Amino acid sequence: MDILPLGVICFAISAVSWWLSYKNVFDRPHECVQDEGDTIRLRCSPYERYWKRGGKTFPKSSIAKIQKAGSLTVFNHSDNATDIWLHDRDVDAVFEQLCALLPDADVVEIQV
């Protein structure tokens, strides 16, 4: 009798996780990359995108390169790299948004 509530809880958690993943709640381009005038905010993890908090803020002029190789990586002029964790189906949309917001950055696409 003690196993039934645990099974229901596990099923509920699995169902909610699947639904959130299926509905693409965490990886929408406007949640990953936000234009804030002269700066850009990158929310790199699903946790940051879900809670709409945190992320890393960079001046647009400091971004040197955008790289797409399975996932996205943004490099600044001091050679620091920031990875953006995305589902494979969402990489192209976020990549296009980054290219539109950062026209002066070098764009590198590596086929994986």
Image (tube, rainbow, N blue to C red):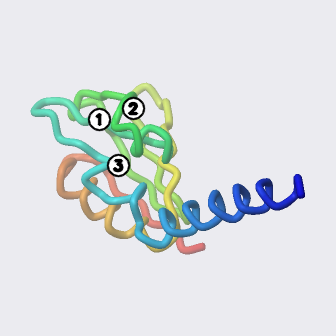
The residue identified by callout 3 is 32
Q: Residue furthest front?
A: 1
Query: Which residue is found at the position 39% from the left and 44% from the top?
Result: 49
Going by the numbered disc 2, the residue's amino acid type is: Gly
Left or right: where 43 falls relative to 2: left
Q: Quadrant of the N terminus?
A: bottom right
Please rate how many residues cluster around mark 2, counting C-alpha atoms within 10 Å: few if below 14, some from 14 to 19, many from 20: some
Number of numbered discs: 3
Label 2: state its secondary structure. loop
Q: Tell me if label 1 and label 2 are in contact, CB under 8 Å.
A: yes
Please rate how many residues cluster around mark 3, counting C-alpha atoms within 10 Å: few if below 14, some from 14 to 19, many from 20: many
Please rate how many residues cluster around mark 1, counting C-alpha atoms within 10 Å: few if below 14, some from 14 to 19, many from 20: some
Pick the residue in front: 89 or 64: 89
Q: Quadrant of the C terminus?
A: bottom right
- Find residue 55 and name its label: 2
Going by the numbered disc 1, the residue's amino acid type is: Arg
Residue 30 drawn at (x, y percent): 25, 53
Query: Which residue is found at the position 18% from the left and 50% from the top?
Result: 101
The numbered mark, 2 or 3, whose residue comes first in the sequence reads 3
Q: Tell me if label 1 and label 3 are in contact, CB under 8 Å.
A: no
The numbered mark, 1 or 3, whose residue comes first in the sequence reads 3
Pick the residue in front: 70 or 65: 70
Residue 41 drawn at (x, y percent): 29, 35
Going by the numbered disc 3, the residue's amino acid type is: Cys
The residue identified by callout 1 is 41
Q: Tell me if label 2 and label 3 are in contact, CB under 8 Å.
A: no
The residues bearing labels 1 and 2 have C-alpha atoms spaced at a distance of 6 Å
Query: Which residue is found at the position 63% from the left and 61% from the top?
Result: 12
Label 1: state its secondary structure. strand
Label 3: state its secondary structure. helix
The residues bearing labels 1 and 3 have C-alpha atoms spaced at a distance of 8 Å
Query: Which residue is found at the position 18% from the left and 57% from the top?
Result: 100
